């Protein structure tokens, strides 16, 4: 989905035991002798053997798990560094391999480097640069998936109204890519197109066009000879969507080609309301969990069970992580998603590629270090085991009220609770906490009083719930009071509201007109999109109503906003737009 591609401007024991555990891990993950191992001191040691690609497509794709995307780089428009990332280096791929990834997807946008008129020639220098990057990755014993990326919406989408020209350009592009890479080893895969969409076309026409593009891609690559005769080719659904009807259409195409070296690909970014925090999707709840379970079951039943491997070419959340903006998704809820999706992939037997847009998300391309190592620990752990989570990662203590016992419900995920720690101190069951029915963990008032100390606003203590396997679950003890929003005036280009958060964290915003109808650009839900329409600024003590929201309001009508906080508090606020001026008014809380 192109909206998340563009930047903001727009794993201790003794050595013998460790070696045994590492070898076990290699077997579980299907690593060959070429794997980068982590030495006891943490230094990557790159073994010298080359990747031996299994003959069966299903086995080869399994050997590619896990995978990683070189996002916002060669797919950036118009050039490699245009979207804020440095140029790719061989050291980058060495890092990715050392971190346990087995393959990389290299998205490439060709449009700025290909003539838009016949014979649609690709610039030699650009083709050479793409080949250099692909070869670096393979030299580090990584499989590579090479594709045609943002061309999908730049010109391929017009095939429904300019069919012959678009198809000719697409065919010319794959003819040139096939020729340039025909002698590459089988560790290189080709992917027909990224998230194809078609303008001004019926559903039936879109299905026909998708089949035509995938089929033409297949014919051109196979006819080019060399290594391309048996290369693994990755065919995609419309827009990369894992809906049943679109996967059925792709299955029909694949079966019609009678080729055992074909791979199906889809993308997965979770249930949309949760992925971007809209329509009340503030928690990784049953709706989000069921959406994931259903999607992966469809992948299994449609493809895997029929002998066709699946490569989930992009995996993540649409609005998380983003270190340039306030977090749309609550951290513990995000961790639940990553833990679950890793398990689901293993359960149904598909390979997943983490979408990494670069420095502001997962891997800092400047330092070659993870921007959030703890998050990556959860992602990596999900590749091999399950970890327990809980109903939430915080317990809230209202400062103005006496401290009482508070609890969370554990999601054991097949593990057994082993205890609760505060730093190096193990808390005492019965005195500090009680465990009911193995899953309801309740902290006593005495323990919370001790842990909250002077009861300053914010996180007073961080606890670790530990389990029989997997990672520990952190529980923050938070002191808060009801937030206060003050009166404000401004223009439709933004309204900055002075806000005392008092230790709380904003979850979402509701917006209603006096008649009960929904206010804001997303008028199909009362809950507006986090960061797109409103955004908290905790360090500066403000809350910003964004232009997208303000400009959508009806002139002269009072709008009631309800700000929902993770503590459970709801704070009311009024806004009214008059021309390009906006007034915000504090609504006193009910007594």
Image: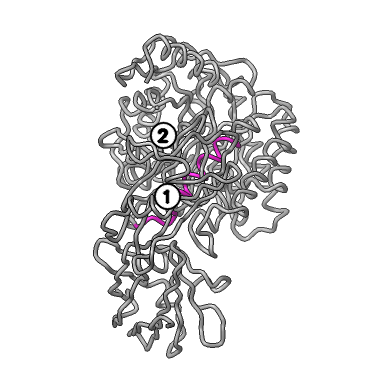
Q: How many marks?
A: 2
Residue 25 position in % (x across, y down): 50, 19
User: What residue sits right under mark 2 in the picture?
Assistant: 377
Task: Using the image as rendered, state which of residue 5 and residue 37 is in the foreground.
Answer: 37
User: What residue sits right under mark 1 in the picture?
Assistant: 331
Residue 573 position in % (x across, y down): 40, 80
Q: Secondary structure at mark 1?
A: helix
Image-based side of 365 in relation to 48, left or right? left
Q: Quadrant of residue 236?
A: top right
Does the magenta stretch mainly form a helix, a strand or a loop?
Answer: helix
Q: Which residue is pictured at 70% across the width and 34% down the height?
A: 303
Residue 522 position in % (x across, y down): 52, 70
Instruction: Report the quarter where the C terminus lies.
Output: bottom left
Residue 531 position in % (x across, y down): 40, 63
Q: Secondary structure at mark 2?
A: helix
- Distance from the alpha carbon under mark 1 to that under mark 2: 14 Å
Image-based side of 386 in relation to 424, left or right? right
Q: For the residues labelled 1 and 2, say whether their Cβ atoms are less than 8 Å apart.
A: no
Q: Which residue is pictured at 29% across the width and 81% down the height?
A: 488
Q: Is residue 522 above or below residue 49?
A: below
Q: Which residue is pictured at 49% across the width and 59% down the height?
A: 277
Task: Using the image as rendered, state which of residue 316 and residue 293 is in the foreground.
Answer: 293
Tag 2 or tag 1, which sits nearer the N-term? 1
Q: Is residue 549 above or below residue 336?
A: below
Q: Which contiguous range is marked in magenta? A: 326-344
| Residue 219 in sight from this viewpoint | no
| Residue 344 in sight from this viewpoint | yes
- Of all residues, the one furthest to the front in this rendering is 431
Label 2 neighbour load within 10 Å: few <14, some 14-19, many 20+: some
């Amino acid at each position: 989905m192109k909206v998340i591609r563009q930047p903001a401007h727009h794993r201790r024991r003794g050595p013998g035991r460790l070696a045994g555990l590492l070898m076990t891990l290699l077997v579980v993950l299907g690593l060959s002798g070429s794997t980068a191992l982590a030495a006891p001191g943490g230094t990557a040691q790159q073994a010298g053997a080359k990747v031996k690609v299994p003959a069966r497509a299903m086995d080869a794709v399994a050997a590619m798990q896990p995978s990683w995307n070189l996002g916002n780089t060669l797919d950036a428009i118009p050039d490699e560094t245009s979207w804020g990332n440095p140029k790719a280096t061989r050291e980058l791929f060495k890092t990715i391999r050392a971190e346990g990834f087995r393959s990389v997807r290299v998205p490439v946008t060709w449009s700025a480097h290909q003539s838009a008129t016949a014979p649609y020639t690709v610039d030699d220098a650009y083709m050479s640069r793409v080949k250099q990057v692909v070869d670096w990755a393979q030299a580090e014993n990584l499989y590579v998936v090479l594709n045609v990326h943002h061309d999908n919406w730049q010109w391929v989408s017009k095939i429904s109204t300019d069919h012959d020209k678009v198809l000719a350009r697409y065919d010319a592009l794959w003819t040139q890519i096939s020729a340039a890479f025909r002698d590459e080893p089988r560790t290189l895969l080709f992917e027909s197109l990224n998230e194809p969409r078609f303008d001004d076309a019926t559903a039936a026409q879109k299905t026909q066009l998708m089949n035509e593009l995938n089929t033409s891609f297949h014919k051109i690559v196979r006819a080019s000879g060399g290594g391309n005769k048996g290369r693994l080719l990755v065919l995609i659904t419309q827009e990369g969507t894992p809906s049943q009807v679109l996967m059925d259409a792709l299955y029909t195409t694949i079966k019609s080609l009678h080729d055992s070296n074909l791979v199906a690909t889809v993308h997965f970014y979770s249930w949309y309301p949760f992925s971007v925090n809209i329509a009340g999707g503030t928690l990784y709840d049953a709706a989000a969990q069921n959406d994931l379970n259903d999607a992966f079951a469809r992948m299994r039943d449609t493809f895997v069970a029929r002998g066709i491997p699946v490569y989930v070419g992009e995996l993540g959340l649409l609005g998380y992580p983003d270190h340039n903006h306030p977090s749309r998704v609550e951290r513990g809820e995000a961790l639940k998603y990553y833990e679950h999706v890793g398990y689901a992939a293993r359960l149904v037997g598909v390979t997943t590629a983490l979408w990494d847009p670069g420095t502001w998300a997962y891997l800092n391309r400047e330092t070659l270090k993870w921007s959030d190592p703890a998050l990556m620990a959860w992602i990596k752990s999900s590749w091999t085991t399950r970890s327990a989570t809980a109903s939430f990662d915080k317990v809230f203590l209202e400062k103005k009220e006496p401290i009482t016992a508070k609890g969370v419900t554990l999601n054991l995920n097949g593990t057994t609770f082993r205890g609760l720690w505060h730093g190096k101190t193990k808390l005492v069951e019965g005195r500090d906490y009680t465990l009911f029915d193995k899953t309801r963990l309740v902290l006593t008032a005495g323990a919370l009083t001790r842990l909250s100390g002077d009861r300053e606003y914010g996180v007073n203590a961080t606890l670790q719930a530990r389990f029989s396997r997997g990672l520990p679950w952190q529980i923050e003890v938070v002191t808060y009071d009801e937030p206060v929003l003050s009166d404000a005036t401004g223009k439709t280009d933004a309204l900055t509201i002075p806000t005392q958060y008092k230790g709380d964290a904003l979850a979402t915003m509701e917006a209603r007109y006096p008649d009960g109808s929904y206010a804001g650009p997303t008028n199909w839900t009362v809950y507006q999109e986090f960061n797109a329409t409103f955004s908290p600024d905790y360090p500066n003590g403000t809350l910003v109503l964004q232009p997208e929201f303000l400009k959508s309001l009806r002139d002269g009508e009072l709008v009631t906003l309800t700000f929902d906080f993770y503590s459970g508090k709801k704070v009311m606020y009024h806004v009214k737009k008059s021309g390009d001026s906006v007034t915000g008014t504090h609504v006193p809380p009910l007594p």
